[in-house]
Image (spheres, rainbow, N blue to C red):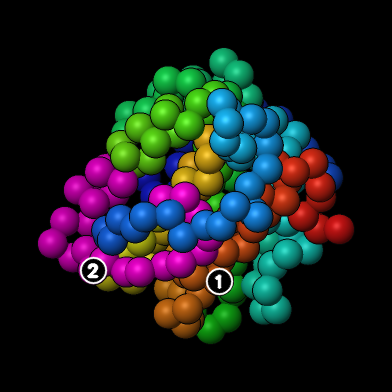
Amino acid sequence: MQRDLRSIAMGAVLVLGLAGCSEASDADDSGKGGLGDGDAMVVRLSPSQLSQALPSKLSAPKGWEGEQREVVQGSEAWEQCEQQGDLTCSGLTSLGTTRFEKPYPSKASMKFTLLAYDTEDNAKVGMKELVTAEHEDAGDKLKPRTVKAGADDTDAFDETYHSTAILRVGTVVAFLPGKHLPQADHLRTFAKLQVDRVKIASAGKNPDA
């Protein structure tokens, strides 16, 4: 699968202008919001919340440049997902992307993709298939990493000049493929930024406030 999911068609997106080391949950109960699923509180995102959860230009670290956030929902999200081939699209409700770039000195980049599902089980399956596809792409170059970012499930690895984190927070799967990251800790930093924004947005708050 293309690591940056480039096949999201610009004409179809709703622009809102506002490894593998698989780990058990490193989240705590205080970070969970969203709607109830039985007795447990499970993080969920509406399309507008997903847009807010994606890292904004304001949240880009010093020296990094953020891009516009793009979101598709409903049948458009499902169609875009189907085109990827390596993603599980059952139960997908919305999909969004953005990117940070650091032009100097190494042309580093980090792509953020969020996939919101209707149930936690569908999100678990979606993450499992994504992890499997990325591991197969990396092959014997894959070097597992431990990244603690407060997610319910995490898989992270390095592969040549790529550093990737795949995380699940409730019904949301985050896919963060980085390239030429200047520091090893940048992957954890961006993973935590994304997880925190998902939790804040699911609680009905603006992560940039």
Q: Residues within 10 Å of mark 1 (few under 14, many from 20)?
A: some
Can you tell which quarter of the image residue 16 is in? top right
Can you tell which quarter of the image residue 36 is in? top right
Q: Is residue 152 magenta?
A: yes
> Position of 123 compared to 169: left or right?
left
Identify the residue at image location x=39%, y=36%: 124
Amino acid carrying label 2: it is Lys
Over which residues does the magenta segment extend? 131-153
Tell me if residue 31 can be seen: yes
Q: Is residue 186 above or below residue 193?
A: below
Residue designated by label 1: 189
Q: Residues within 10 Å of mark 2 (few under 14, many from 20)?
A: some
Query: Which element type, helix, strand or loop, lies under badge 2?
Result: strand
Question: How far across and down, in percent of the image, does residue 156 sit?
Answer: 35, 61
Q: Earlier in the sequence, mark 2 or mark 1?
A: 2
Residue designated by label 2: 143
Amino acid carrying label 1: it is Thr
Quadrant for the C terminus in the image: bottom right
Mark 2–mark 1 Cα distance, whole angstroms, equals: 19 Å
Q: Is residue 69 magenta?
A: no
Question: How far across and down, in percent of the image, does residue 208 sit?
Answer: 81, 58
Q: Is residue 160 above or below residue 84?
A: below
